[in-house]
Amino acid sequence: TQQSLNRDTIAAVATAPGRGGIGVIRLSGPKALSIAQQICGDKPLKARYAHYRNFFHSEQLIDQGLALFFPGPNSFTGEDVVELQGHGGPVILDQLLKATIELGARQARPGEFSERAFLNDKMDLTQAEAIADLIDAGSAQAARNAMRSLQGAFSDKIEDLVESLTHLRIYVEAAIDFPEEEIDFLADGKVAADIQALLAQMAGVEAQARQGAIMREGMRVAIAGRPNAGKSSLLNALAGRNTAIVTDIAGTTRDILREDIHIDGMPLQFADTAGLRDAPDKVEQIGIERAWEEIHQADRVLLVMDAEQLHSLDPAEAWPEFTNQLQDLDKLTLVLNKIDLSDYSAGLQAHTQGVPVIAISAKTGAGLEALKEHLKQSIGFSGAAEGTFSARRRHLEALERARAFIEQGSQQLHSHGAGELLAEDLRQAQQALGEITGAMSADELLGKIFGSFCIGK
Ligand code: GDP
Ligand code: ZN
């Protein structure tokens, strides 16, 4: 896509801050080799050889270690790259880095090495992001997913989608170019069938990407309900310690309390929210507003209700205001709490109106295993999930946008036989997909993505 411009040479400490056996300075750019030669002495650094050298600057011996030279384009960034591997002390590394800068390099911005690799077509955006994910992985599963994305598992899926979409676009554009045949072209059922097939293909990729994003960022679970239903007790029981304040005074949890919990390697971010009721007090009202925000943003909402006070298992009857507010009932689970006081059996699982119901006691722990199992199932998590790859919310949003365009186009075709409008929607869908791999990304987006990487990457 983009040509390797005449860039400056960048340098950074590539190893983690602090002390360690080894510390690495990485250089990339046209002057990488000449700068390294000035530090390592005159004997030439051969490509892809490990040379044991003294590192000098201004006649001063700074350190000794290995120098490795990777000539472009067969390097990580696609440019000339040199690694100086010295001892991992902050003072030594700082002196080495300063030496490279005095010799003409510039301190790299966060993620700038990966950005160059992307700009030089060494990898696409999802792969560059996968490197960051691999480094940040909080679990073995998340690391495996990142590795799969890095190897192109996600990019391949997006490319398949783009290919299907391109076929469809060619067909539709051709139909528009031959107006006398347009009606036949568009009405022959092929386009409609292709659109349906494409939507099904997208739904598959979206589901995988959603699981990948959840494995990376954690599934967001909001614990909601009326005051005293046992929300804070549930959070404490899940966390296995007392973080949330439990009292029998209604309205105690006024702000959001968060807790990261792993269930069999699946990361979850629980949020204990303020009890939902008509609050007379201003402070409590603010807490309730925040609770609603949390509920809307969550991947899953656990609506905790006191089993003794429940008059119906149907959430729409049990709490009509709540189900009205929450349009998307797909992410709702009704949790019947305090079954130690009533005659529900622990772990009872039912569905009403498609909403799962699970009976627990936060006090005795009964039913908690069933609840955990349910949370895993709700996103199709299986401990050793094969075929998942790491993905980000940004990818999901782009996929959703692409799907919305295709659905809209399909509607245009269906109700108006409008080929032109369909063609435009398909073009926009492709644009959205292109943002995922970086085939069509605005500079601003790139800046945002690479800016969140750490330095030296
Ligand atoms: P929240 O306002 O929804 O966060 O509710 P809390 O967790 O603060 O609990 C309110 C009251 O209900 C406290 O006195 C808890 O001890 C009690 N409680 C919570 N869960 C259970 C349960 O499963 N069984 C019984 N018997 N009491 C519970
Ligand atoms: Zn509480």
Image (tube, rainbow, N blue to C red):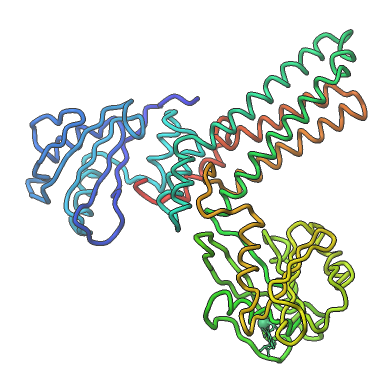
Q: Nearer the viewer, residue 68 or 207?
A: 207
Quadrant where the image shows the C terminus: top left
Q: Nearer the viewer, residue 434 or 366?
A: 366
Q: Nearer the viewer, residue 180 or 96?
A: 180
| Residue 330 visible in the shown view | yes
Query: What residue is rendered at 15% in x and 28% in y?
Result: 46
In the image, residue 261 lies at what x, y percent? Answer: 53, 68
Query: What residue is rendered at 89% in x and 70% in y?
Result: 317
In the image, residue 215 lies at what x, y percent? Answer: 54, 54
Where 337 falls versus 357 (above or below)? below
- Please state if 402 lies on the left or on the right of 318 as rendered: left
The answer to which quarter of the image holds residue 368 is: bottom right
In the image, residue 176 lies at what x, y percent? Answer: 82, 14
| Residue 253 visible in the shown view | no
- Please state if 33 lies on the left or on the right of 380 as rendered: left
Where 287 falls versus 210 (above or below)? below
Q: Nearer the viewer, residue 354 or 125?
A: 354
The answer to which quarter of the image holds residue 205 is: top right
Where 346 falls versus 131 (above or below)? below
Quadrant in which ligand 1 is drawn = bottom right
In the image, residue 236 lies at what x, y percent? Answer: 58, 79
The answer to which quarter of the image holds residue 354 is: bottom right
